Image (spheres, rainbow, N blue to C red):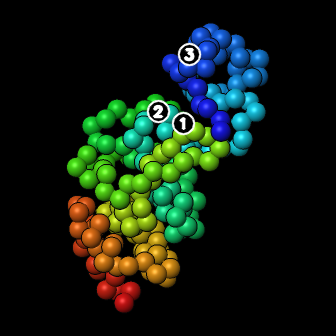
Amino acid sequence: MARTLTPNTAKDEGLSRSALYRAAREGRYERIARGIYLPADADAADWDLIEAATRRPDATVCLASALAHHDLTDSIPTALDIAIPRGSRTPAGSPSIAWHQFDQATFEIGREEMTIPGTDLTIGIYSPERSIADAFRLRGETGYELARDALKEWLRRGGKPANLIEIASRLPRAKGPVLQTLEALA
């Protein structure tokens, strides 16, 4: 497992900040994002997931990125969609991460943890039901087709509408559109 280092955590590996920078210049560590390093011999890993998890411990894969992870869409997101609680500071970083602020009261609904392959890090990810409900709730931002197509695929795989409605009922502006689409597809 590759251990991610930042200038603040380098001391855990017995390195000073300057020693970390020197090791990166010598090719022993690879800079994957501003202030984030991996050993040069680390297995291939998703650098955007690593960056998001390193910058925010509560980072959660959401929207189109979560739907793609759950194989509920054929769309390839242009950026990694990451949710953080509303009111928290949005990290500076790569344009390949789209930061979204979700209400603190509903942030944990449908949130699970997954290990980032090839690393010692974990990151949050929303369940298929939460991801579909969010796609309907934020359809002005994501597009109605994404939500509808993800719902169709989820139902085709045996998804239980009662589970989806339970999640959608707990999120603002999600239950109505989900129910209307379920009725239209029935």
- The residue that label 1 is drawn on is 51
Q: Quadrant of the N terminus?
A: top right
The CA distance from mark 3 to mark 2 is 18 Å
SS for dot 1: helix
SS for dot 3: helix
Give the mark, 3 or 2, whose residue is nearer the N terminus.
Answer: 3
Q: Nearer the viewer, residue 68 or 140?
A: 68
The CA distance from mark 1 to mark 3 is 19 Å
Question: Percent position (x, y) of residue 149?
Answer: 47, 74
Note whether residue 20 is visible.
yes
Label 1 vs label 3, nearer the camera: 3
Kind of residue sitting beneath label 1: Glu
Kind of residue sitting beneath label 3: Lys
- The residue that appears at 38% across and 79% down in the rendered structure is 160
- The residue that label 3 is drawn on is 11
Is 41 left or right of 158, judged from the image as shown? right
- The residue that appears at 31% across and 35% down in the rendered structure is 88
Which class describes the residues within 10 Å of circle 2: few (<14), some (14-19), or many (20+)? some
- The residue that label 2 is drawn on is 55
Which class describes the residues within 10 Å of circle 3: few (<14), some (14-19), or many (20+)? some
Which class describes the residues within 10 Å of circle 1: few (<14), some (14-19), or many (20+)? many
Question: Percent position (x, y) of residue 33?
Answer: 59, 30
| Residues at discs 1 and 2 in contact (Cβ within 8 Å) | yes
Determine whether 160 is above or below 46 in the image.
below
